[in-house]
Amino acid sequence: MNKKVVFLFLLIALPVIIFLFLKTFGKNEFVIPVYYEQGLGDSLSTPCLNKAKEQYVVNTKEVSDKGIKVVHFERLDGPVLKTRLEALERVQDVFYEFDNVSLTTYLNGETIKAKDITDYNKRIQFLDQFWKVRELASEEWKKLKLCNMAMTNLDNRVVLIDTKNRIRGYYNILERDETDRLILEIKILNTEE
């Protein structure tokens, strides 16, 4: 009987003691990687990228120096665009009241016009103070995507940029898990800043 009491006590008390120890002395930290800390090197074949060996920083007039930025590139209209816009609307719903977080969608003006996505306003609400939609000339769009965001031509991911204009993540927002990860990492960056 005595062994059963000791065993039962350890079975119940040990997890509680471990939990309290970790709660008191543990540190809960999430670290979001900083991309290209040693420069871009030869990781991408785009010839216009800065191949210097120091931390790569997005340096373009299209990306402001203020706050956390989510950048999305789109070149075609269609059902995939609708799905991406719906995923980005989830991001907007979480962060539209945050002054230091913004979302910009860049459209390739050669293949999709800003007026083409106004039909989505019936289903998706674009809050102008948070979500900007910009139409760029095709060459300017390609330069921003390939040369400034270190993406490939076939890359359709969303880019997360911190307040120091460092790339902190790429996300395929067609997958719900990736959109959830984007939202979580924006929250983490927001507490870091």
Image: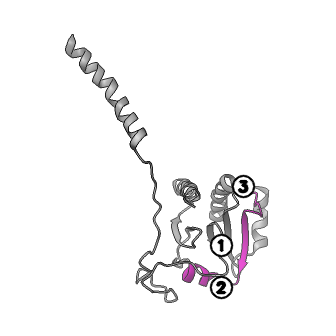
In the picture, the disc for residue 110 is none
Q: Tell me where residue 131 sits by quadrant.
A: bottom right
Question: Tag 3, which secondary structure?
Answer: loop
Of 38 and 83, nearer the camera is 38
Return the x and y of residue 82 as percentages of the image width and height.
67, 61
Question: Tag 2, which secondary structure?
Answer: helix
Mark nearer the viewer, 3 or 1: 3
Q: Earlier in the sequence, mark 2 or mark 1?
A: 1
Magenta-drawn segment:
125-148
In the picture, the disc for residue 76 is 1
Point 73% across, 70% down: residue: 133
Of 36 and 67, nearer the camera is 67
User: Does the stretch in magenta take in 140?
Assistant: yes
Please state which amino acid type lies under the numbered disc 3: Glu
Mark nearer the viewer, 3 or 2: 3
Please state which amino acid type lies under the numbered disc 1: Leu
Question: Tag 1, which secondary structure?
Answer: loop
Is mark 3 in CB contact (under 8 Å) with mark 2?
no
- Residue under numbered circle 3: 97
Please state which amino acid type lies under the numbered disc 2: Glu
Return the x and y of residue 142 as percentages of the image width and height.
60, 83
User: Does the stretch in magenta take in 1?
Assistant: no
In the picture, the disc for residue 140 is 2
The residue most toward the front is: 25
Q: Earlier in the sequence, mark 3 or mark 1?
A: 1
The residue most toward the bottom is: 47
